[in-house]
Amino acid sequence: MDRETEQCQGPDRRRLLAVSCGATFGLLMHRMALGASSQKAGQEFVETTCPTNARPAKRVLIAYASRYGSTGTVAGAIAEALCGMGHQVDVRLVNTVKELTPYQAAIVGSAIYMGKLLPEAADFVKANQDALGRLPTAYFVVCMTMKDDTPQNRAKATAYLDPVRQEAHKVKPVAIGLFPGVVDFSKMSFMHKAMLKTMGSAEGDYRDFPAVKRWSSDANSKLLTAPGER
């Protein structure tokens, strides 16, 4: 092959490689998106009410957003603790909550993904800030930052709430819970799993239910012994 022919074929070959790489990348991203949606759709999320056969002291909403389910188990543990203190508690996914008027207190929780609240949790708070602002309201987050409970990690985890606290400034949380969650690669999207493995995150159940129970007791004193509206 002479030099002129080689020079003519060079750009064509590069274009072919670029097209091939682009197609491969597009296919990979499509697989990631499918994986994320199918994994999320296959999860089981806690929604419950307790107790159902007693006259409660107060009715409390725990509205949460979860990506893989562990935030729902934390919400359920909070509900169990508060129910044991005599309150009726509804645990609901944020996107299923239609009305806040039946409640005398609210707790809103979210998993943290890529350093942020899940969008549906942030949207719920912003859309309902007038009602939440009239109720004693608490927040909680579930994130692997809290795998090690240090002052530095607490400050970092608390800061995840800063955007929604600024945008929904009418809500003044009386308590903020910071809890670790679960790393289960079998439930994760391809992209999330790859990201965590690159970061060196190890699989494990890091939930601390005694800490959740202690926080619930503290939240009870701040949320539920106060008047229903401020």
Image (cartoon, rainbow, N blue to C red):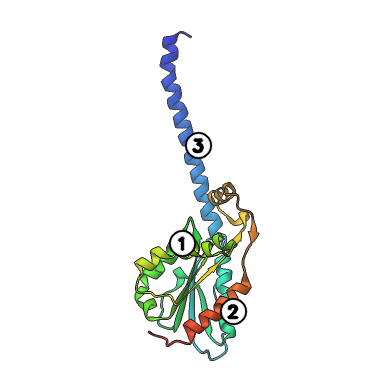
Name the disc covering residue 24, or none. Answer: 3
Residue 42 placement (x, y as % from top left): 57, 60
Residue 219 placement (x, y as % from top left): 51, 79
Residue 81 placement (x, y as % from top left): 59, 80
Q: Residue placed at 58% from the left, 70% from the top? A: 73
Q: Is residue 15 above or below residue 60?
A: above
> The disc labelled 3 sits on which kind of residue?
Thr
Label 2: few (<14), some or many (≥20) within 10 Å? Answer: some
- CA separation, marks 1 and 2? 24 Å
Q: Quadrant of the C terminus?
A: bottom left
Q: Residue placed at 39% from the left, 66% from the top? A: 164
Q: Is residue 228 above or below residue 109?
A: below
Which residue is denoted by mark 1 in the rendering?
118
Q: Earlier in the sequence, mark 1 or mark 3?
A: 3
Q: Earlier in the sequence, mark 3 or mark 2?
A: 3
Q: Nearer the viewer, mark 1 or mark 3?
A: 1
CB contact under 8 Å: marks 1 and 3: no
Name the disc covering residue 71, or none. Answer: none
